[in-house]
Image (tube, rainbow, N blue to C red):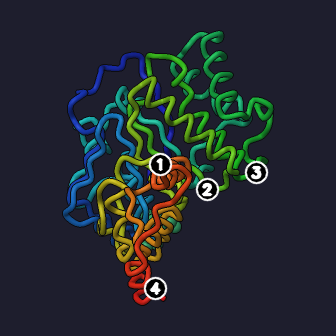
Amino acid sequence: MRMFRRSTPPHTPEPDPEAPVALVENLRHVYADGTAVDFGDVPLAVRPGERVVLLGPNGSGKSTLLLHVLGLLEPQKGSVRVFGRPAHTLPPEWRARVAALLQQVDEQIIGPTVWDDVAFSPRNLGLDRVDADRLVEGALRRLGIWELRHRVPHALSAGERRKVALAGAIVFSAGTRFGPRLLVLDEPFAALDPRSRAALLALIEELRHDHGTAVLLSTQFVHTVPEFADTVCVLAPGGRIAAHGAPEEVFARPEVLESLDIEPPVLSQLFRSLERRGISLPAPKSVEHAAELLAGHCRDGVCRLPDLSSGRRAQEEYG
Ligand SMILES: Nc1ncnc2c1ncn2[C@@H]1O[C@H](COP(=O)(O)OP(=O)(O)OP(=O)(O)O)[C@@H](O)[C@H]1O
Ligand SMILES: [Mg+2]
């Protein structure tokens, strides 16, 4: 695998706004030791501004897929296109529009201090000192790590290092010239505390608002996925795309998730359990949405309870 490093060109042409930002078709990868990952023939497209979440058990190929989208691995079969071009030969001026967080963050942190690391790309671009410093300060403050700026990255905690790598990835997002069009995040919430996870979700929404950024991320934090994702893609062991669609469609098939040892979001479980008891409501996206749906189910403080026969049926069926 080639080292990932952010590149910063002098001119950035606009990618075609109509084309999928990323498109993966018939991809198969065989590692040097013979381990094969085959994503099958279901295409995976990420459209402008779309939020796509990859779920899958350990070893199912999430990182392999993301490394292909980042152009760090080359397809042996099939194709991976980003902005309509093969990802592994993406011109640097378009590569600069892709912000990435690798699962192994240490592979992308190279500066001797946090400040130097986040400043790598602005310096590489030859921005004047004042502009570069402004971008670095903005990114450090956005990630809440301003006070870490003089620290040695490799002496930081796992969550702190992840924030440093994220700051480097989004360092241009305060300006308009190189705002990211595609954010590729491999397990971005791992090692982050709840407040930091919420802050990262808010940051992603800001980027989408400011730059129309599309997002492709992998995560094991399934509970926030219905609120966050437009599309969910579930990988089975070996890489096959086992389910693909809107969260409410994918999470309506718990048997697929359970067969892959993926726990459905807790709110999906709760609402399916209510359905078995005769209360049928739309799929909830968040705690707030679930509360609204349940409150709407009650009129004037009196809950419309299901008729007893359906409750009995549910009890007989599910115990
Ligand atoms: N460098 C490598 N050499 C050989 N096999 C590899 C290499 N990297 C990954 N693999 C194998 O490829 C498969 C997919 O691994 P990958 O890291 O993409 O899975 P993942 O879904 O990201 O897992 P996790 O949830 O643990 O991050 C696994 O069987 C893994 O053992
Ligand atoms: Mg992985």
Give how far apart the Cα atoms at labels 2 and 1 are.
18 Å
Disc 1 marks which amino acid? Glu
Residue at (59%, 52%) from the top-left corner? 189
Asked whether 198 or 40 is in front, the reply is 198
| Residue 299 placement (x, y as % from top left) | 48, 51
Please, is residue 93 above or below residue 75 in the view?
A: above
The residue carrying mark 2 has its beta carbon less than 8 Å from ligand 1: no
> SS for tag 3?
loop
Residue 157, numbered label: 3
Question: Closer to us: mark 1 or mark 3?
Answer: 1
Q: Would residue 159 be visible to someone looking at this image?
A: yes
Residue 130, by quadrant, is top right
Give how far apart the Cα atoms at labels 4 and 2 are.
38 Å
Disc 2 marks which amino acid? Ala
Disc 3 marks which amino acid? Ser
Q: Are marks 4 and 2 in contact (CB under 8 Å)?
A: no
To which residue does mark 4 refer?
A: 315
Q: Earlier in the sequence, mark 3 or mark 2?
A: 3
Asked whether 318 or 31 is in front, the reply is 318
To which residue does mark 1 refer?
A: 227
To which residue does mark 2 refer?
A: 190
Please, is residue 191 above or below residue 196 in the view?
A: below
Please, is residue 41 above or below residue 70 in the view?
A: below
Asked if residue 16 lies left or right of residue 54, the reply is left
- How crowded pointer 1 is (Cα within 10 Å; few <14, some 14-19, many 20+) is rated as few
Give how far apart the Cα atoms at labels 1 and 3 are.
28 Å
Q: Are marks 1 and 4 in contact (CB under 8 Å)?
A: no
Give how far apart the Cα atoms at labels 3 and 2 are.
12 Å
| Residue 226 placement (x, y as % from top left) | 44, 53
